[in-house]
Amino acid sequence: MKKEDLIAMGLSEEQADAVVGKYGTMIPKERFDEVNKAKKTLEDQVKNHETQLKDLQDKAKGNDELQKTITDLQQANETAKTEYEQQLKDERMSAALKLSLHSKVHDVGLVAGLIDKTTIELSEDGKVTKGLDEQLKTLQESKSFLFVPEKQQPAYRGWIPAGGVDDGKGASDVGSNFAKIANDKGSSDASNNPWG
């Protein structure tokens, strides 16, 4: 959550600064719920598997067939744990890519699918640190229609007022023209009056 979001919710600027200063930038609730749900699921699975293993170990003393079943379950638990960690890593990568591409492309999901995730590195806080910029540059050269164009300052064309360019060098005004006419004639008597 950003400072502007807090102000929009009714906090004063000082209160918003205090919240951002104390807690920093906040992760979106959807991302928190996703990770929290995955964590709870894994904890439940681990507790369930540990309970099963303990029961089997108690029953298996002296029984080779049950010992084999226990070994198989331990291997299955290791495989499930590895798969879960890979899935969690993939979800972190996907969320980090979507956050990084959010305002740069028209279709975040499409561009994220074109990115080689094996070359991208994430920091501990889940931000992309390396590998994305090079791929985006290459992709932008080949498929520029996927990217949101950068806002450019409009080029103003038209008349340039005297003194507007080069601080007035080479420009003239009416007073300068009258002075030049008077100097060219050599005197400033009434007969040289440009007004008639």
Image (cartoon, helix red, strand yellow):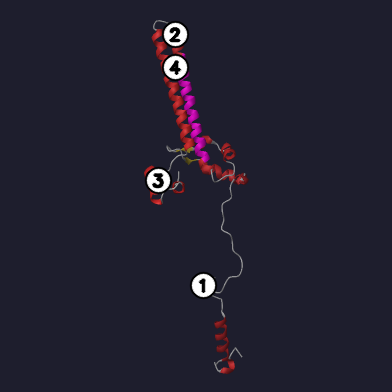
Mark positioned earlier in the residue sequence (1 or 2): 2
| Disc 3 + disc 2, Cβ < 8 Å | no
| Distance between the alpha carbons at the discs numbered 3 and 2 | 56 Å
Q: Amino acid at mark 4?
A: Gln
Q: Amino acid at mark 3?
A: Val
Disc 3 is placed on an element classified as helix
On screen, residue 76 above or below 145: above
Q: Which residue has dot 4 on it?
A: 74
Q: Which residue has dot 1 on it?
A: 167
On screen, residue 10 above or below 90: below
| Distance between the alpha carbons at the discs numbered 4 and 2 | 12 Å
| Disc 4 + disc 1, Cβ < 8 Å | no
Q: Amino acid at mark 1?
A: Asp
Residue 104, numbered circle:
none
| Disc 4 + disc 2, Cβ < 8 Å | no
Q: Which residue has dot 2 on it?
A: 66
Q: Nearer the viewer, mark 3 or mark 4?
A: 3
Mark 1: few/some/many CA within 10 Å (<14, 14-19, 20+): few
| Distance between the alpha carbons at the discs numbered 3 and 4 | 45 Å
Mark positioned earlier in the residue sequence (3 or 2): 3
